[in-house]
Image (cartoon, grey):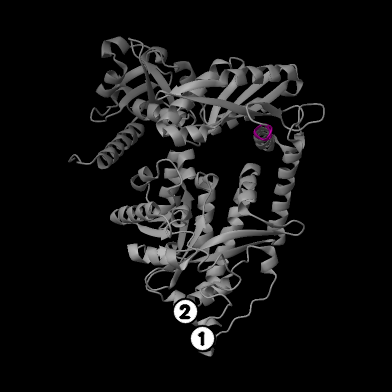
Amino acid sequence: MESALDSSNRVSIVEFDQNRVLDDAESSCADEPVKQFDLADFSPHGLLLLTSDFEFVKANSAFFELTHQSLEEVQGRDWLNCLPHLEAQSVANTLTEADWHTRRNVELECQLISPLGKRKWVKIIAQAIGANRTTPGSYVLTIEDIDVSKRAADQNLQLARIDSLTGLPNRRDFEDALTNCLQQPNVARSILAVLFIDLDGFKQVNDNFGHEAGDDLLKSIAECITSVSARALKVARLGGDEFTVLLTDLKRIEEVKHYASKLLLLLQQTISIKGVEAKVSASIGIAIHHKLIDDRRGVDRIVTDLLRHADHAMYAAKESGKNCFRFYGEKGEQSHGKGALQNKDSLIRSLYRALQNNDMYVLYQPQVQTASGETIGCEALLRWRHHQHGMIGPSKFIPVAEEGGAIDELTIWLIESICADIVETFMPNPVIAEASKPFTVSVNLSPVQLQNCKTLETIDRIITRNSIASDRIKFEITEHTLIAEPRLAADGLKFLRDRGYRISLDDFGTGYSSLSYLHRFPFDEIKLDGGFICDVEKNEASRTIVRGVVDLIHSLGLSVVAEGVESQAQLDFLTKIGCAYWQGFLRSSGVLPSELLLDVLLPDDELDFGQPGRCPAQNIGDSSAAEQPVNYRLPDSLTKAIV
């Protein structure tokens, strides 16, 4: 037989010949002594032939190399001595208890220990041959060295549970530890506490001294928390500057207070970074298990509630002046900031009702090509009109949705609504459907969404189900998303890029090290923050900065969209320096889908909205303006196109 050049073919040859040998042996075992069985020396795996009583008969050369033994050492020895220091009795029991009538192979993994004490993982595949299926005449054991792959898999599993920066367990490992603890039978007879720790002023350290200094600070904080947490079952870093501690087997609430006070004192320190002193402290939120226990919810829900309540309590500590700890509001305990917590909980409940009652709606802000004045895309803006409190801005309800676990439902609702608008309003129009460049809708993704692979998969399924080409959707992320968890953000961006979606970096220039992201992440477009644009009319320094940034981004082969354009003078400057695209109040603050369609179809001089250059319902984000009817003149020549 010719040897194959590639490994996959070679393996298949070995398996074919080995099976043929086994078949030949089995067919001859009834009439010939089992010792006449020939084991193939060409196999890369160890092969061992045993009698039905597990006594050694024969082995190939690979077996002796694998076990570091000679033929003389194993000749005439029983099973327990053939494989040195292996859990042989357990393996033998597995073989004898196997139902050979219904199965041909038994496969298991175990460890060998060499004479020098080195452990090696192997996979054993046992095959029964001869006699009959219920009572084998002998066994052939294939012993494969899987040590490298096994240890690599174990290492990957370990890395998946470890925060790469601090070496602490991550969120997944912490949640598993909390789940296991809650499942213990004696947990109800003691106090269990979850502490949510957030550093005060960490953003300033990052902004003033750089992310390297911020990383050093996080590692130092991790060591501090660990040093005072000898009684803690688990200390973890959830991400960014957020840490958690799990305390168990406590008898009194005072023990939790004592621990939290000690931890605050340790974290309240002055550190030196690059020769400059900086003060740091922490805010701690605490959730207690025995106050929340409810068997009907199930363990998974209790885990979610404990983390969410501790997070809420941490925000109460922030609102109380920082550098303190607060318990999640409970009668008889410290509950400072309780009103704020109740407001957040109420807001989350209202948010769920709004999704069910369609109180949410989507507006679209046009994105305009500077040279032609044509609308070539838009940004989706989520709005909420509360039945009692009027308009609630996204800056208020988005963070609460993230904290309260409602962000996934909110995202799915938004994507479903955008897809419906694309399919029902935008694509049926030939101007959009037949445009040479795809008309794109931009959607903002929060850090929570980008780091959740299940959410991204759901988003992709919704878009695919609606038969919308991926190049018509653009996802916008902010620098904060990249700072919080760069590795997870990179994984999320890769997922989107692999499926053909465009990616835009929003609010460029507002963070510490924006330039480093331009080559680290796969962006198609950079959105220049409106803070740069507002001063270009009067400030030469601002004009120089904007011109330089636009040239830099263009030199990298990326598109630039200027945000926050509010005056004709600003637009004239952007046109002069070659900024290809813009958006802002000069065109519109956000309109309904049908009104955006008018903006695409009609040039400005053919529309009369009372204010030149504005689309209808320019202030629809304001509840008072949104209720007013809009009168505009539509040329007869375009009536059919719109319909």
Q: Which residue sits furthest right?
A: 332
Residue 164 visible in image: no
Q: Which numbered disc, 2 or 1, marks the residue that appears first in the sequence?
A: 2
Q: Which of 550 and 339 is in front in this view?
A: 550
Quarter of the figure that contains the N terminus: top left
Q: Nearer the viewer, residue 38 or 610?
A: 610
> Regarding mark 2 in the picture, which secondary structure is present there?
loop
> Regarding mark 1 in the picture, which secondary structure is present there?
helix
Q: Which amino acid does label 2 sit on?
A: Pro
Residue displayed at 58% across by 23% down: 234
Residue 188 percent location from the top left of the image: 75, 24
Residue that numbered label 2 is attached to: 603
Residue displayed at 34% across by 65% down: 576
* Within-10-Å neighbours for mark 2: few <14, some 14–19, many 20+: few
Q: Nearer the viewer, residue 270 or 491?
A: 270
Quarter of the figure that contains the C terminus: bottom right
Q: Nearer the viewer, residue 563 or 359?
A: 563
Circle 2/circle 1 CB separation < 8 Å: no
* Range of magenta residues: 316-320
Q: Is residue 505 left or right of residue 236?
A: left
Report the mark closest to the observer, 2 or 1: 2
Q: Is residue 337 left or right of residue 383?
A: right
**Relative to 477, residue 183 above or below:** above
Residue displayed at 50% across by 89% down: 637
Residue displayed at 51% across by 21% down: 270
Residue that numbered label 1 is attached to: 638
**Relative to 318, residue 501 above or below:** below
**Relative to 538, residue 46 above or below:** above
